[in-house]
Image (cartoon, rainbow, N blue to C red):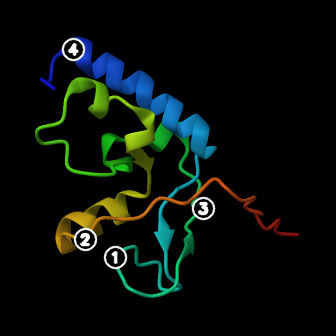
Amino acid sequence: MQRTPQNLELYQQVCKQVMERADNMCEILVDDDRSACSNKEKHRCLKYIPFDNVTYTNFLHTETRNGKNDEWVLNPKNIILGCALHHLEEERTGIRVERCSYDEISYIPVNE
């Protein structure tokens, strides 16, 4: 996918769809130390990412985009909403992060 203004606009629309799916919360699985690239037991990060603070660093593809067609790159199923920290960790370690599953209900604790 070439980086053109038209493609950037399409990508922005897809990113909004991903944020809606995730309810603006990080979808990446992390361990108790908040590491996404470990072999330990993991749970969903759930850190809230406000729309006003989101950048392209908050969107990770499930696989490398190299050699993929535009349809694959722009498919919300292939994009994960995550903390920028997890994206940097993925790049640093070379280990792909895992996205949470939406098969089950996630309960969000309420602070009282």
Alpha carbon of mark 3 to alpha carbon of mark 1: how far?
Answer: 16 Å
Q: Which amino acid is tagged 1?
A: Cys
SS class, disc 4? helix
Residue flagged by tag 3: what amino acid is it? Leu
Q: Residue sitting at 32 percent across and 17 percent down?
A: 9
Q: CA distance from mark 2 to mark 3?
A: 20 Å
Would you say 84 lies left or right of 20 here? left
Task: Pick whichever of labels 1 and 4 is earlier in the sequence.
Answer: 4
| In front of the other: 64 or 48 | 64
Q: Which of pointers 1 and 4 indicates the residue nearer the eye? A: 1
**Left or right of residue 56: residue 106:** right
Task: Please tell me which of labels 2 and 3 falls first in the chain.
Answer: 3
Q: Which residue is mark 1?
A: 37
Whether the residues at callouts 3 and 1 have beta carbons within 8 Å, the answer is: no
Amino acid type assigned to the residue bearing label 4 in the image: Pro
Which mark, by number, is residue 95?
2
Q: Residues within 10 Å of mark 3 (few under 14, many from 20)?
A: many
Q: CA distance from mark 2 to mark 1?
A: 6 Å
Q: Position of residue 39 (x, y in %)?
A: 38, 86
Residues at marks 2 and 1 touching, judged by CB atoms closer than 8 Å: yes
Q: For numbered disc 3, what is the local secondary structure?
A: loop
